[in-house]
Image (tube, rainbow, N blue to C red):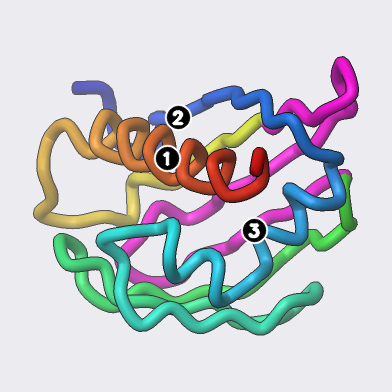
Amino acid sequence: MADRRSIIVEQTYVIAAQPEAVFDALVDEDLLSECLAPLQRLRLTPGSGGRIGFRDPELGPAIGRIGEHDRGVRLTWRMVQNWPGVLSFDFFREDGGCRVDVIQSGFGALRGVRQDIDQVFAARWEAWMNAIKDRLEV
C-alpha cells in the first residue's frame, strides 16, 4: 500500500435529482443517519463551520466541521479525529440530474487501521451514495 498521506479516494456518482437536492441530502442529519450505515449516533449542524460527528464501529468516534458549504456546488467535511481528514463533494448539473464527485484524502492521520483502508472507504462511499441515490430517485 502507498504511504497513507498520499492516498486519495476519488469516485463519481450520477443521480437523477437536482444538485441542490443532492446537496441537501448530504446535510440532512436524519437522511444521513439512515443511509450511512454502519455509522452510529450521527450528529450534524449544517452550514459552514457546523459540526459533524458520529461513531464509526471500526474506527471509533469521529468528529469534524463542515468547511465549504455552497449549496448545490461544493460541500466539505474536515475531520479531526478517527477518520480521513478531508472529504469533498462537488456537484455538477448533468443531463437533467447531478454528477457528484466525491474525493476523500488525509488517510495519514489514521493509525493502526487496516492496510486496505482506502478500499474500505471506497466501498463504503459506493454503498452510501447508492443509498442516497435510492432515496432521491423515488
Q: Looking at numbered disc 1 in the image, what kind of residue is underneath it?
A: Trp
| Alpha-carbon span between mark 2 and mark 1 | 10 Å
Residue at image coords 57%, 76%: 29
Snapshot quadrant of residue 66: bottom right
In the image, taking residue 104 as reference, residue 101 lies left or right, namely right
Q: Earlier in the sequence, mark 3 or mark 1?
A: 3
Q: Which mark is residue 125?
A: 1
Location of the N terminus (image quadrant): top left
Residue where numbered disc 2 is placed: 9
113 versus 19 height, above or below = below
Q: Quadrant of residue 95?
A: top right
Q: Which residues are magenta?
A: 73-100
Mark 3 or 2: in front is: 3
Circles 2, 1 touching at the beta carbon (< 8 Å): yes
Q: Nearer the viewer, residue 84 or 126?
A: 126
Spot occupied by residue 107 in the image (x, y as percentages of width and height): 36, 45
Of label 3 and label 2, which has the lower sequence position? 2
33 over 110 or under it: above or below: below
Q: Amino acid at mark 3?
A: Leu
Q: Which residue is mark 3?
A: 26
Residue at image point 50% right, 83% down: 43
Crowding near the residue tagged with mark 3, few <14, some 14–19, many ≥20 C-alpha atoms within 10 Å: some
The amino acid beneath tag 2 is: Val
